[in-house]
Image: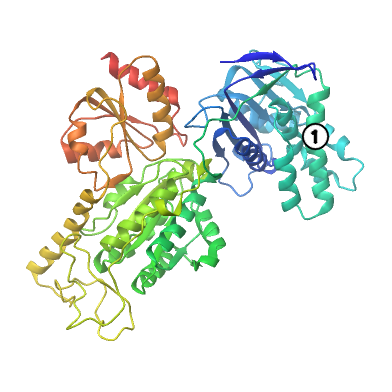
Amino acid sequence: MATETLETATPRKVQSIDRVVVRMAGDSGDGIQLTGNQFTSTAAVLGNDLATLPDFPAEIRAPAGTLPGVSGFQMSFSSFDIHTAGDAADVLVAFNPAGLKTNLADLRKGGILICNLDAFNSKNFEKAGYKTNPLEDGSLEGYRTFAIPVTELTRKALRHLKLGTRDMDRCKNFFVLGLLYHLYQRSDDITLRWIERNLKKQELAEANRTALKAGRAYGEATEAFQIVYRVEAAPFPAGIYRNVMGNSALALGLVAASLRSGRPLFFGGYPITPASTILHELARYKEYGIVTFQAEDEIAAITSCLGAAFGGALAVTSTAGPGVSLKGEALGLGVMTELPMILVNVQRAGPSTGMPTKVEQADLMQAMFGRHGEAPMPIVASSTPGDCFDTAVEAARIALKYMVPVMLLSDGYLANASEPWKLPDEKDIPRIGTRLVDKPVAGKFHPYERDPITLARPWAVPGVPGLEHRIGGLEKEDVTGDICYDPDNHQKMTDLRAEKIRRIAHDIPPVVVDGPPSGRLLVLGWGSTRGPIAGAVRRKRSEGKQVSWVHLRHLNPFPANLGEVLRKFERILIPEMNMGQLEKLIRMEFLIEPTGFHKVEGKSFKNAEIADKIDQLLEV
């Protein structure tokens, strides 16, 4: 709901609104991601709830001005609780024709369109596939279009500085940022402090400061923007917040798990989009004893983790879809040796190289079955950027308590998206027990003598007299750990490894239904579909429709009460960014017939898509 007031100090009308969706799009060299992150930080400090959606090409440097080279950043900030970066943009900033062409469809009718007029020339029209100038051919009717010579205005603002043309042009993103700050009544202070901290060359720092102020001054001076907007702070619970991205939160969760378990954290990884920044983040926490190792390939990365786990460390590796395939054999070795370790799979659109910077959640079946032999593993899935912290702690808890490798599923959206995150109190982070044995034991040590409840074997630290034992990929004799080819023993060890995973179901929270506990329709989700599902369910309930919702964190094993919950509903809707993988598992496990809703476009669901599907099922 919007209200309008007229401020006496300025002739502008200031309109209060409760939510805005802004998208910026341009060439990869236009500083789109930096501009978006600066706007995000400012909104976070001002107390808005927010969600972001970065979108960038996989190519290191696609040709400038072309459609594959477009980098985008969408953010939504609001005065109330939101779950996604928004279905449609209220504002689109197009730094060039390619940015316009690839993003215009997501601008709502009547929305604000700001174009860098200087980039709208015949050369760029040809690269973007335009046969006519979209600013002149009537194709932008229905939008509030502002064609601004951003490049020229930036150069004029910086002409007193001793900079080359290229350096001046690189500041045009801050000119646009200043204009947006004026349009949405944001302060420059956060960005000015960022410039002070991060731009060490004084002439570049001064250029960006000047461009930022010039953009704001242009907004204040021009007659074009007669209305500016204000979005008040959202009512958050009391606490200390920081703006966090999924991979950053996941790294922090691993550090916390290391401290709460008393085990040193070893991370062995190999760079792959979109998982690489987990390694980068962890490398910043060496003061907590974190050891990071960039291996020469995926196989070396996970086998280094096996060695670290054998040596008594909380061992973690991360990768994305194709990397999981290369780690498959070592995962089987982890299952056979029963060592605690975590594999973080930041899923991306596949198969093969696929669309590595686009989102998909299509590795669930691979997580369940992507190993040779009978090799079950627990699977935990993150659902929001902030939830990546909690799921990292939970994955470590399961790995260390049950002496098993754990698969932690995130995805490209969670990795790069951000949201306000309340810093947890240390006492609220659970202490994590282990089966560590680091002193000689009475009598002969038996490496496969299991805990009667968890079936976890003891974790013997190498080098302690009396704890000598055999380890490797060959089948072990029950209790002694000696190599054994006895058929009955292999059956027994296989059963024990499977039963150990099944028992985790009684050590995880039961699912809680959001909404009525029974009825006509339940929406069942997992992973980063949480935001769109939450928005769609909230919308339908506001219309008086009864729809319930369950979101899964544990995918193997399922929570113990899940089957009972599902059977209380006439229909189950499962939206997934794959072709129905959870849908198949639910059908196989509980012998019920859910309705799948599948999307593999490299884009997240929109609230409206799920809301429409809910309507369809309720009308049947």
Instruction: Determine the secondary structure under disc 1.
Output: helix
Could you tell whether 110 is left or right of 245 in the image? right
Question: Percent x, y for residue 76?
Answer: 56, 30
Q: Nearer the viewer, residue 231 or 218?
A: 231
Q: If the image is split into quadrants, where does the N terminus sit?
A: top right
Q: Is residue 418 visible?
A: no
Q: Nearer the viewer, residue 213 or 121?
A: 213
Residue at figure coordinates x 44%, y 58% from the top left: 256
Q: Is residue 349 visible?
A: yes
**Residue 514, quarter of the rendered image:** top left
Q: Is residue 135 above or below residue 560?
A: above
Could you tell whether 37 is left or right of 245 in the image? right
Q: Which residue is mark 1?
A: 151
Looking at numbered disc 1 in the image, what kind of residue is underneath it?
Answer: Thr
Question: Percent x, y for residue 463?
Answer: 33, 83
Residue at figure coordinates x 36%, y 55% from the top left: 430
Q: Nearer the viewer, residue 22 or 491?
A: 22
Question: Percent x, y for residue 416?
Answer: 53, 44
Q: If the image is split into quadrants, where does the C terminus sit?
A: top left
Using a 10 Å C-alpha cutoff, classify the residue at mark 1 as few (fewer than 14 neighbours), some (14 to 19) or many (20 or more): many
Question: Percent x, y for residue 534?
Answer: 40, 29
Q: Nearer the viewer, residue 128 or 478?
A: 478
Q: Is residue 366 above or below residue 183?
A: below
Q: Which residue is situated farthest in the bottom direction here?
A: 465
